Image: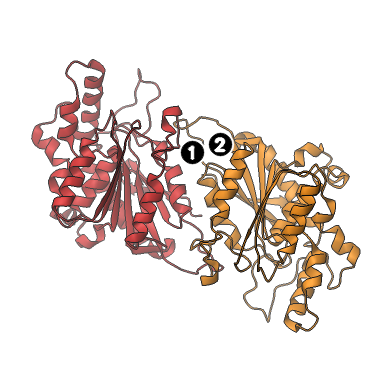
Chain colours: A red, B orange
Amino acid sequence: MICEKIKLWEDNEHGFLETYIPKNSEEITTDKKRPTVIICPGGAFLATTDREAEPVAMRFVAQGYNAIVLRYNTYFGKKVTDRKNPPKGNDKSAYPQPLFDIAKAMLIIRENAENWLVDNDKLVLCGFSAGGNVVANMGVHWHDELLKEKFNVDSEMFKPNAIILGYALTDHMAMKKGVSANNEGAKKFAELANKAAFGKEYPSEEELMEASPVNYVTEKVPPTFIWHTGDDAAVYVANSLGFASTLSKHKVPYELHIFETGVHGLSLCDETTAANENHINPGCKQWFDLAVNWLRKHDVKL
Amino acid sequence: MICEKIKLWEDNEHGFLETYIPKNSEEITTDKKRPTVIICPGGAFLATTDREAEPVAMRFVAQGYNAIVLRYNTYFGKKVTDRKNPPKGNDKSAYPQPLFDIAKAMLIIRENAENWLVDNDKLVLCGFSAGGNVVANMGVHWHDELLKEKFNVDSEMFKPNAIILGYALTDHMAMKKGVSANNEGAKKFAELANKAAFGKEYPSEEELMEASPVNYVTEKVPPTFIWHTGDDAAVYVANSLGFASTLSKHKVPYELHIFETGVHGLSLCDETTAANENHINPGCKQWFDLAVNWLRKHDVKL
């Protein structure tokens, strides 16, 4: 297993990859290329949570995938344990930096394709919550001039073959509408999350729209697997319903699973990722097998 | 993930461990101890095959286990690709060296319990084919004076909490009966395998019996999960039927699954471990989930 930490940028300590690449064994299938998944954990752009990182990678590796966790630029980098003395914020966490991070991750993976046995036609992006925003943005923007100019390479280099969105934030406007003006705690959190995602506490509607992938869906979006819980109180199910609806209009192949109940941030829904009992949810746990079977249908498999 | 290669013995290059220990994350369940599985790949005591190593470890890690592959002493160490010019044989591959290797592995794991978050009451041994012989021998001999004297520690240190046997060689006599005197190829292979397992081409019946765990079953054997295919042409199903029968007599809790058909060496029965099409067997693939559910029943779980 190749377990490495790889920096995305020379001048930035925040963005990096964690690789989980199985051994190339001549006893199994020598040099056989593998599907590769880039996993973007959530964390409200304040951090990338471990709960949606290594354990998810392990689940994919067990199914024959290369897995790579993308620690995109976030405001604090790690979960803040001492809330009274938070570390200095990272001024590079705001949109579109995370989009540049995932684009750079794809280039690094393609550069290492031979050594890591990457099948360049089987690249999956899998994101949760805020990480789902990063993934969905890549799904809608991979062919944009923005990325082509930034990196000076062919757009095809950024094309994902499938994307997986777990309780993903795809519509900042839907989020804004949900924050009650009467809830001080929620307002404070929204301000901090906005500082992280936009570099300011009060982004304009234009800025909110710009960072919302739901507004950029075209027929070029790759096949998309979406799951959410109906009563998610942090990232509202309206995000996934709206995104699926837009995919449907543009005839993008997609699969949508709304499980009736479950808290936000379920990750794998079992003991391997649970921080508390609410994170154990046998009803929602099926999402992973559903997703892998769906990937197989799209030939994104070993 | 702690991925390390650890030598078992100072004076022996052949025996070593490969560790797959998930990260201790304060975001999931800080310092929570995990069940740990030691995986012994098969290979007729000539080598330990990759096909029953890392991919099997990944499957367990994905379920929340620590996984450790034991490369016990074998005759060639690695699969011999140039059969005309095989490497020099390892004179330490013969019984009881592999038993000492697995005993040493258990001590190393207990020594590292704190750092690796090992739950010392949830140690599982999982062996395939010849590796199943090593595991089954540990299952029957863990309380023996032989090990206690060799290592000068309490027998409890060697006690597994459960064992898993995949098409395991548990009865050398049953194997001997199966080799047809008219098949020159099979005879030659049996001689080489005997050289590896016993240090001689023609071990005595007494020596064959001594290395056969089926002859040492007592009520002290830990709960045992066994699977095999009915038409295994390399390690005959008589091994598993006989072993289960003896466990039954001694009232050892066990579970037995004989799948109707399947070649020898199926490992995970799918693309992740297949070296050829015969190794893809959806019918037998259930063994892994059956085994994990059975471990849960015995509380050997996260």
The disc placed on residue B66 is: none
Using the rendered image of the protein, determine whether residue B11 is visible from the camera's viewpoint. Answer: no
| Front one among B256 and B3 | B256
Q: Quadrant of the C terminus of chain A?
A: bottom left
Tell me where residue B116 appears, x and y as whole percent. Answer: 59, 38
The residue located at (16%, 18%) in the rendering is: A181
What chain does badge 2 belong to? Answer: B
| Quadrant in the rendering for residue A143 | bottom left
Is there one chain holding both mark 1 and mark 2? no
The residue located at (30%, 39%) in the rendering is: A228
The disc placed on residue A272 is: 1
Q: CA distance from mark 1 to mark 2?
A: 8 Å
Q: Please state which amino acid type lies under the numbered disc 1.
A: Thr
| Quadrant in the rendering for residue B93 | bottom right
| Front one among B67 and B247 | B247
The disc placed on residue B302 is: 2
Tell me where residue A33 appears, x and y as whole percent. Answer: 41, 66
Q: Is residue B235 left or right of residue A245?
A: right
Q: Please state which amino acid type lies under the numbered disc 2.
A: Leu
The residue located at (37%, 45%) in the rendering is: A287
Tell me where residue B94 appears, x and y as whole percent. Answer: 80, 62
